[in-house]
Image: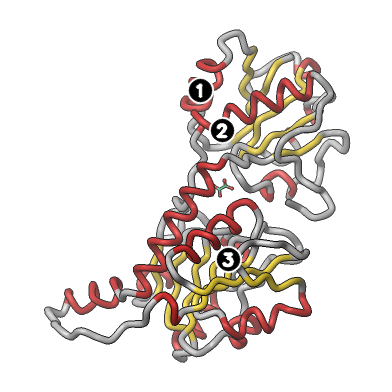
Amino acid sequence: MSIAIITRGKDLIPWVNALKAKRPTLDLRIYPDDTNREEIEFALAWNHPLGAFRKYPNLKCIASMGAGVDHILKDPDLPEAAIITRVTDQNLARDMAEFTVALVMNHVRGLSFYKRQEHKHLWKPKPYLNSSDITIGVMGIGVLGSYVATQLNILGFKVSGWARTTKEIEHIDVYVGQEELDAFLGTANILICLLPLTKETINILNKQTFRKLPEGAFIINVARGEHLVERDLIDFIDVGHLSGASLDVFREEPLPQNHPFWEHPYINITPHIASITNPATAVSQILENYDRLRNNEPLIGAVSLTKGY
Ligand code: OXD
């Protein structure tokens, strides 16, 4: 068996090195320079050219090179027989938790506020809230979201989660489904989006959602740019209902030079770096799945096509 890597615009050197270091005999092919595509049953993919999988008539597994699979599922021409997997590496959850904690603390302790004051040479302390006075709502409590929620709770925040189906997470109030969305939003002083991108969650950060948040709520989006209706965010910050946002993901990446988010005083931008898959650790799961596929065993991180994650 051989593995094909099918991507666009990704630096493949660390991936090839990590795969070769773990499995020196691996027969690795890189699209579009590969031949004999009928030999390929296992593909690694990130942001592939749509339709490319169809060129591999015997594909049995398409493994995402990250936690998200929306870039694969948006292909209308997916081979029906292929199982799709995503990286569930515990390092991704740790990195995401560290990053969201940094964003939450930046907001809670007013670091961006003081940065703006610093530019004006202003020395004006303002009162601040303690973690126990703040409720953080985490939308999406899968592998990443539940870890993030737990870490924030350890810091003393009240944390609630919103999920599609019931989940038990110690110390976290879990709200379920559309019926409990309003109740979940009603208490969230900080709303963190960690949802998978599906047809149910696209544009979920919109004016209806923002309206239900308490006055002064803060938005953190570390999931996908398509979750957010950008104009609604700006409007709700500008009228003062939201206090601001930290965004790591955007509908268009890199964020276009003339985008209003760049100049907005209450919006912090980072370039999609919340939690970056480390090839050195992710390849262990990928090679494990490669072996499992050969042995007809269930794959780790297999995605449900109906749920979309
Ligand atoms: C991912 C990402 O899905 O980097 O892994 O966004």
Q: Is the residue indicated by label 3 positioned so its CB lies within 8 Å of ligand 1?
A: no
Mark 2 crowdedness (10 Å alpha carbons): few <14, some 14-19, many ≥20: many
Residue receiving disc 1 = 18
Q: Amino acid at mark 2?
A: Ala
Q: What is the distance, in whole Å, between disc 3 and disc 1 at their CAs? A: 31 Å
Element class at badge 2: helix
Residue 227, image x, y percentages = 62, 66
Q: Is residue 215 above or below residue 204?
A: below
> What color scheme is it?
secondary structure
Residue 117, image x, y percentages = 20, 79
For marks 3 and 1, the one nearer the N-term is 1
Residue 78, image x, y percentages = 81, 40
Residue receiving disc 2 = 282
Q: Quadrant of the N terminus?
A: top right
Q: Is residue 21 above or below residue 179?
A: above
Verify CB contact (< 8 Å) between mark 2 and mark 1: yes
Q: What is the distance, in whole Å, between disc 2 and disc 1 at their CAs? A: 9 Å
In-front residue for pair 140/268: 140
